[in-house]
Image (cartoon, coloured by chain):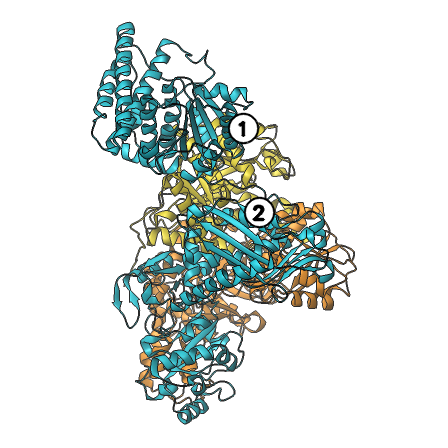
Chain colours: A cyan, B yellow, C orange
């Protein structure tokens, strides 16, 4: 490490000396009252102004700045301290550059660079930077050994919309190799002296002042802003002298990683200062280091891609090929991997493509999609996987049904003739994942396999175990096993005072939003309908009452509902919007509850139909004794556990009994050792009035009859 | 026994937002009671009325409008007359002509129009786009730059283009940002959160919660506004305390009742009266629900609504 | 705060005797809690229990019927201050005004308000009430009452002279009019008259305190079919009074003000129809139960009735339009068909954009339970089979065109619909209505 800090301090001291000399010379020549300013800016000497709040307007202000600059160079053997010295270099460079504007109104007239970047240009650059239209800012300095290669790097940035600033002889190298320059081409030459790098530093700093509303003098906030919001990085080429290294340290202090083309060996600092000696990899590595994602504008495939094609049906006669699980092995799998194992946008085809068969053909297809990302979680794999269905269907001439290892994908003759091939599937999948899941996926590679043996291998040794793991995880998720619940307020447009609290064991009452869905929604749409509730402040375990839940519900319903319990139907039960799959209502005569599903149109033993129950339960009101819920909740151990749980269930429509029977039996066996509990529960074939139901329950010796009175 | 009055007071208030500069600046919002409840406490700044003019001029306008603007042939000339319209608090330039699916007027042309309009008036200016997200983003950036320092409100940033509009209007050129959502309290709040996360200060945001003409789903407008005000005041929800500005004219004058010729529906009577009443009824309803400013266009509507606001102060 | 169903259930006999007409005591209790049924329908409750509960279950604002037969209207009965909290139940009524102190021309112009009579989304839109105002000439007044009574609408008799009022009531006997003329000065007398003729009684006062006392005074006589007249020379005062009265009743449970209100915007802005329209809209949104205007024209009615229909829609029961074929822009049997759902808002937005396009289209509205496109699709009420059934049964026999545009949001149905309607060309339209103009023009 010391080699690096030595270099930084050496460079910083050299620049400090140069600066001090230059300031003294200038004062001697022009006097202290001589004005010093960059053209067309309201931010004085921006680096000094932003870092210290000092407004430099005349030469006489500068000696104090030199003092501050020197104080930043502590010489201590510590990387953080050394980076501060790098900032000193930036300040020194700024002063030296400012003095050029004292000497001449247009010191860059004879240079191929433009020098100081005026405020209006920064304002106009701010918008595309904020929107991601300019996804990043590259600063390239020095002189490369191979002019052609370095020009390719610049062009690489150019095609990705990245704004590139050039400092040093690299400008001429680029010009020679036909790189188009100017703001419109997003390649801006700054100047040849290494100090002209200050002109890009002040761009970043003024962006923080203008767009981040950072208060001048608030250095920590400034550094946080440039680190988090200004997606810049540095590529340095050629031999590294101490001054360049210390300027690089300044960049690192601002949060901009530096990539050099020489091998720095063990003085590299991962994430901050790295070597990439193979210049063909500089672009990819730089983008990855700064986590810059390029917006995809149009998917390059030969057929149209739009939701309007979602409903297209491809008949057997019209199809070129199909990948059908009932005929050939198939599977689709999204897996999370380490960043190092993934090459972004790599699309691999293993086996023959669809142009090797004649219609109508059957082929195998295994699709392995590997993703990584700082915010990616294994739980999001199935969320992404479920979207594949839509993306395939959005392609004109492609039809997709099913999921996992049971799918059918058809390509129409027309689409095939237009040139649709397997790599286009890969393109679509990659583009859509990088677009729709940009907040969690940083890199993605897609492998499409048609080689039957290899598909079988993927399916049986990778995919199936993964599916099983997921199912086991889902089954094993309990309210106790997590520390966060989620709100869901998707339905507030018609039930303003309703808020679902989604827990692993209690999915949204519509049946469509599981805890995993809610969790993914939060990551993908951070300000969206699902917000996390820390599982804190449990005041009553039996009822499932949490102060954090009450606060979240109160907030989400604008105060309309102040308290809900998770496990009780009688005390502050959860509200219902109206889209519940089922309604549970108490039937005191039978000392239990009945559950009725939306599809059941007849009378229930409570004396009310689903419709009548819905009218009093919906709309976001709390109706003790009645609540809406999803089908899945019925077999949960948490189902109205405050009132005694599933033992209280005395009646359900036949269809509902059939659909939840097995799971309910299992839970009953676990909870109170009952065999075939479902048979003790009445249905419409037994009774639709409470008297007959009671007789039935007595005959079956239903456990609810022996429990404490429900109310 | 006297009637026991129980004023509904809140420990929160709608943000006050100033448009324009100097002596002619106008402030909207600031209420710490429900809309128009001056008997309960401080309603802050009484609702303000903007007069809308279009870059397309008076194409298809009724007699009352053409008479009022007689002699004005450019948007700037119209604006000069608009700000003199009795009851006007600010002028709103609607750049309908920029719509790529319509006249597709260029950004440069629109900037020139906006500059001319701004130069012709002393009241504050509001710029309304063409409802095409991409075009509006481009348009607003350039106009915000051209009118820097004039403290102009731009309608609107939507979820789709909030980054570009927010960055250009709210950050780069320190103008006021209108946040437009479609009649849903959660979407409105989400957009405000997104804009503030971008760095736009809450006090520089006004909300357009979406509007509808009377009879055309106004219940959603009413309930959204009711809920937004309840949350802003009752829950002290800072992400919903932005003042509400509602463009009424464009909605009101584009429904069948306001548009069809008398010849086609003789029993309905003169088209101009129908348009004016649709505009008036919609505006009055918006104010009752919580708009802190409405944008109208017909001189009769502006006069009537400003008189109503004065009577309710 | 109304009682929860379970609290009511606890005091029922829990015998499921069905004497109340409900299968179980629980069902009965839940209906009482909802206000759908009166507590005294249960014959087995002791008077003690009933008395104890009637206070708690009594609605905060009285529901009062005005008029009779086909012209019977419901006033009051509101339980919430904002419609999203539950729903508003009794739409406000409109009145136009004639009077003996007005000129013949003015009266004729006012009577012409009866031409406003049309239907909008299943609701008849007309001026329900006629306000006949007494100005001193009793003979002329009574003539006007007679004429107005003959128009098949319910009357508001704005008269504070008891003798004239009695004669007017005699002329309108059995029609349950509103006698709007009680004040502190004549409260007892007017209440007795209203009671005698089964009329409603409108009460007015110089200020809210006086109004409060007067109402309390009248209530002591046992007569409670009251309407509170908040009319004032100032719009601000009328608005303040209307809001405070409604709030006192619903929020503070002050039943003395638990009555519908009346506001005469014609008197606030005489001769200014624009202002009357503005104020009528204001009081439609906030708490005017009866809005009296000088006259009603289509120009004012179209927005005001539309607004009222919106405000008084139950948030959980969206407005629906009649399923069927709606030819737009002069469409005939050869014009393309575009299908959507019967949710009123969808219909208005879609038909509005289609009309803007100028392209002749047969807009097909299918029965989708009043839901929006995606909700109806999710609920299975707007599916390939429901669309195919509707097209085959209702549309195919009447329309020759065989092009059908589907809403872009249900593009997923395209293949299935095309399969079920083999002789139709099924096209996916736009996702948003606003894109329709371009889409149709380019089709």
In the image shown, does A653 or C12 lie closer to the viewer? A653
Labelled pair 1, 2 in contact (Cβ < 8 Å): no
Question: Separation of disc 1 and disc 2 at Cα?
Answer: 40 Å
Q: Dot 1 surroundings within 10 Å: few (below 14), some, or many (20 or more)?
A: many
The chain under label 2 reads A
Against A301, residue A170 (above or below) is above
Q: Is residue B152 visible?
A: no
Kind of element beneath mark 2: helix
Against A173, residue C380 (above or below) is below
**Residue A413 on image: x %, y %:** 72, 54
**Residue A561 on image: x %, y %:** 35, 63
Q: Residue at x 65, y 67 (%)?
A: C386
Kind of element beneath mark 1: helix
Disc number for residue A333: none
In the image shown, does C335 or C224 lie closer to the viewer? C335
In what quadrant of the picture does the N terminus of chain A appear?
A: top left
The chain under label 1 reads B
**Residue C164 on image: x %, y %:** 49, 66
The quarter of the displayed image where residue B5 is located: bottom left
Against A59, residue C327 (above or below) is below
Q: Residue at x 64, y 47 (%)?
A: B259
Q: Residue at x 27, y 29 (%)?
A: A3
In what quadrant of the picture does the C terminus of chain A appear?
A: bottom left
The quarter of the displayed image where residue C72 is located: bottom right
**With B211 as the anchor, is B254 left or right in this view?**
right
Q: Dot 2 surroundings within 10 Å: few (below 14), some, or many (20 or more)?
A: some
Q: Which residue is mark 2?
A: A427
Discs 1 and 2 share one subunit = no
In the image shown, does A370 or A598 lie closer to the viewer? A370
Disc number for residue B111: 1
**With A349 as the anchor, is C51 left or right in this view?**
left
**Residue B95 on image: x %, y %:** 56, 35
């Amino acid at each position: 490490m010391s080699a690096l800090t030595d270099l930084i301090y050496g460079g910083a001291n050299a620049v400090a000396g140069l600066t001090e000399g230059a300031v003294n010379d200038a004062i001697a020549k022009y006097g202290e009252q001589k004005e010093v300013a960059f053209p067309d800016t309201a931010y004085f000497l921006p680096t000094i102004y932003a870092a210290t709040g000092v407004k430099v307007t005349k030469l006489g202000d500068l000696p104090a700045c030199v003092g501050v600059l020197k104080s930043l160079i502590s010489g201590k053997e510590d990387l953080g301290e050394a980076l501060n010295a790098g900032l000193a270099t930036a300040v020194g460079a700024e002063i030296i550059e400012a003095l050029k504007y004292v000497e001449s109104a247009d010191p860059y007239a004879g240079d191929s660079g433009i020098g100081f970047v005026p405020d209006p240009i920064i304002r106009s650059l701010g918008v595309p930077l904020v929107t991601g239209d300019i996804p990043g800012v590259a600063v390239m300095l020095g002189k490369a050994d191979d002019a052609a290669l370095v020009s390719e790097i610049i062009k690489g940035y150019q095609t990705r919309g990245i704004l590139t600033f050039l400092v040093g002889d690299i400008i001429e190298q680029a010009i020679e190799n036909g790189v188009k320059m100017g703001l419109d081409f997003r390649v801006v030459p700054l100047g040849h002296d290494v100090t002209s790098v200050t002109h890009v530093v002040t761009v970043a700093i003024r962006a923080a002042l203008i767009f981040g509303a950072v208060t001048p003098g608030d250095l920590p906030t400034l550094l946080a802003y440039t680190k988090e919001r200004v997606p810049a990085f540095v590529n340095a080429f050629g031999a590294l002298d101490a001054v360049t290294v210390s300027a690089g340290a300044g960049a690192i202090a601002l949060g901009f990683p530096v990539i050099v083309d020489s091998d720095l060996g063990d003085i590299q600092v991962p994430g901050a200062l790295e070597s990439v000696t193979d210049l063909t990899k500089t672009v990819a590595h730089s983008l990855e280091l700064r986590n810059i994602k390029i917006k995809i504008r149009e998917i390059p495939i030969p057929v149209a891609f739009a939701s309007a094609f979602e409903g297209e049906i491809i008949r057997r006669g019209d199809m070129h090929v199909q990948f059908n699980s009932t005929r050939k092995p198939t599977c689709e799998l999204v897996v999370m991997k380490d960043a190092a194992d993934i090459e972004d946008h790599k699309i691999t085809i293993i086996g023959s493509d669809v142009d090797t068969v004649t219609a109508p053909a059957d082929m195998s297809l295994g699709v392995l999609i590997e993703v990584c990302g700082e915010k990616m979680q294994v739980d999001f794999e199935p969320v992404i996987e479920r979207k594949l269905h839509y993306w395939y269907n959005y392609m004109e001439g492609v039809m997709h049904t099913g999921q996992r290892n049971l799918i059918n994908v058809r390509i129409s003759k027309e689409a095939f003739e237009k040139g649709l091939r397997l790599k286009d599937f890969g393109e679509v999948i990659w583009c859509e994942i990088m677009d729709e899941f940009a907040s969690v996926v940083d890199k993605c590679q897609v492998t499409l396999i048609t080689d039957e043996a290899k598909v079988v291998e993927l399916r049986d040794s990778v995919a199936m175990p993964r599916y099983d793991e997921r199912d086991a995880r889902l089954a094993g998720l309990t309210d106790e096993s997590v520390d966060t619940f989620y709100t869901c307020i998707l339905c507030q447009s018609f039930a303003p005072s309703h808020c679902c609290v989604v827990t692993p064991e209690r999915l949204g009452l519509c049946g469509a939003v599981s805890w995993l869905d809610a969790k993914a929604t939060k990551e993908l749409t951070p300000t969206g309908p699902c917000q996390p509730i820390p599982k804190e402040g449990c005041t009553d375990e039996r009822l499932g009452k949490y102060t954090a839940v009450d606060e979240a519900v109160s907030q989400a319903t604008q105060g309309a509902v102040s308290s809900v319990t998770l496990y009780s139907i009688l005390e502050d039960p959860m509200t219902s919007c109206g889209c519940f799959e089922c309604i549970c209502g108490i039937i005191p005569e039978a000392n239990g509850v009945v559950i009725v599903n939306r599809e059941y149109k007849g009378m229930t033993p409570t004396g009310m139909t689903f419709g009548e129950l819905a009218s009093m339960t919906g709309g976001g009101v709390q109706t003790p004794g009645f609540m809406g819920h999803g089908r899945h909740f019925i077999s949960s151990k948490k189902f109205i556990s405050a009132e005694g749980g599933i033992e209280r269930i005395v009646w359900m429509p036949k269809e509902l009994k059939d659909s939840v029977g097995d799971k309910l039996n299992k839970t009953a066996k676990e909870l109170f050792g009952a065999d075939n509990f479902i048979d003790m529960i009445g249905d419409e074939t037994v009774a639709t009035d409470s008297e007959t139901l009671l007789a039935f329950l007595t005959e079956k010796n239903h456990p609810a009859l022996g429990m404490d009175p429900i109310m | 026994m006297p009637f026991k009055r129980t004023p509904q007071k809140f420990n929160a208030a709608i943000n006050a937002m100033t448009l324009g500069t100097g002596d002619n600046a106008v402030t909207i919002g600031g209420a710490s009671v429900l809309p128009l409840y001056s008997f309960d406490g401080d309603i802050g700044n009484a609702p303000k009325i903007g007069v809308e003019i279009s870059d397309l001029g008076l194409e298809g306008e009724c007699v009352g409008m053409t008479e009022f603007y007689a002699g004005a042939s450019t948007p700037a000339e119209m604006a000069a007359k608009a700000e003199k319209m009795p009851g006007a608090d600010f002028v709103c330039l609607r750049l309908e002509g920029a719509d790529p699916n319509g006249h597709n007027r260029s950004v440069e042309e629109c900037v020139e129009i906006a500059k001319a309009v701004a130069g012709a008036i002393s009241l504050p200016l509001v710029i309304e786009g063409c409802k095409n997200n991409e075009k509006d983003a481009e348009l607003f950036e350039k106009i915000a730059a051209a009118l820097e320092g004039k403290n102009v409100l731009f309608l609107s940033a939507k979820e789709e283009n909030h980054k570009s509009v927010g960055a250009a209007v709210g950050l780069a050129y320190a103008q006021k940002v209108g946040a437009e959502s479609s009649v849903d309290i959660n979407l409105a709040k989400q957009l405000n959160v997104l804009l503030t996360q971008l760095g736009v200060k809450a006090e520089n945001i006004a909300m357009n919660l979406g509007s509808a003409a009377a009879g055309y789903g106004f219940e959603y407008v009413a309930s959204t506004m009711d809920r937004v005000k309840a949350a802003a005041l009752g829950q002290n929800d800072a992400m919903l305390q932005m003042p509400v500005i509602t463009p009424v004219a464009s909605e009101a004058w584009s429904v069948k009742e306001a548009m069809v010729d008398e010849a086609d529906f003789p029993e309905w009577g003169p088209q101009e009266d129908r348009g004016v009443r649709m505009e008036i009824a919609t505006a009055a309803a918006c104010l009752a629900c919580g708009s802190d400013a409405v944008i109208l266009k017909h001189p009769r509507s502006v006069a009537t609504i400003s008189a109503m606001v004065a009577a309710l102060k | 705060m109304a009682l929860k169903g379970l609290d009511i259930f606890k005091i029922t006999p829990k015998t499921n005797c069905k004497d109340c007409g409900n299968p179980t005591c629980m069902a009965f209790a839940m209906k009482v809690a909802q206000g759908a049924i009166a507590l005294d329908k249960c014959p087995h409750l002791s008077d003690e229990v009933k008395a104890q509960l009637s206070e708690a279950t009594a609605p905060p604002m009285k529901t009062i019927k005005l008029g009779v037969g086909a012209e019977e209207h419901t006033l009051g009965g509101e339980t919430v201050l904002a419609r999203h909290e539950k729903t508003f139940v009794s739409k406000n009524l409109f009145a136009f005004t004639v009077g003996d102190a007005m000129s013949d021309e003015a009266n004729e112009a006012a009577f012409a308000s009866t031409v406003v009579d049309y239907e909008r989304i299943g609701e008849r839109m007309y001026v329900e009430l006629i306000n006949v105002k007494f100005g001193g000439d009793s003979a002329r007044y009574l003539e006007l009452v007679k004429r107005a009574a003959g128009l098949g609408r319910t009357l508001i008799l704005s008269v504070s002279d008891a003798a004239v009022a009695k004669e007017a009531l005699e002329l309108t006997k059995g029609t349950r009019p509103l006698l709007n003329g009680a004040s502190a000065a004549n409260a007892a007398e007017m209440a007795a008259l209203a009671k005698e003729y089964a009329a409603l009684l409108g009460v007015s006062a110089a200020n809210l305190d006086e109004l409060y006392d007067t109402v309390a005074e009248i209530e002591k006589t046992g007569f409670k079919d009251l309407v509170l007249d908040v009319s004032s020379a100032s719009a601000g005062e009328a608005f303040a009074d209307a809001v405070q009265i409604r709030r006192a009743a619903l929020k503070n449970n002050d039943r003395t003000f638990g009555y519908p209100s009346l506001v005469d915007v014609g008197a606030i802005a005489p001769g200014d129809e624009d202002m009357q329209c503005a104020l009528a809209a204001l009081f439609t949104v906030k708490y005017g139960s009866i809005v009296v205007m000088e006259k009603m024209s289509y120009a004012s009615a179209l927005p005001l009735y539309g607004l009222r229909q919106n405000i008084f829609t139950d948030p959980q029961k969206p407005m629906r339009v009649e399923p069927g074929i709606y030819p737009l822009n002069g469409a005939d049997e050869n014009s393309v068909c575009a299908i959507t759902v019967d949710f009123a808002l969808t219909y208005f937005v879609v038909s509005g954009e289609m009309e803007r396009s100028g392209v002749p289209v047969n807009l097909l509205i299918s029965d989708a339970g009043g839901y929006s496109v995606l909700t109806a699709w999710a609920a299975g009420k707007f599916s390939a089979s429901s669309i195919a059934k509707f097209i085959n049964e209702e549309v195919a026999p009447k329309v020759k065109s065989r092009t059908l545009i589907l809403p872009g949001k249900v593009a997923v149905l395209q293949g299935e619909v095309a399969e079920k309607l083999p002789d139709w060309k099924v096209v996916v339209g736009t996702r948003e209505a606003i894109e329709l103009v371009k889409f149709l023009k380019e089709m």
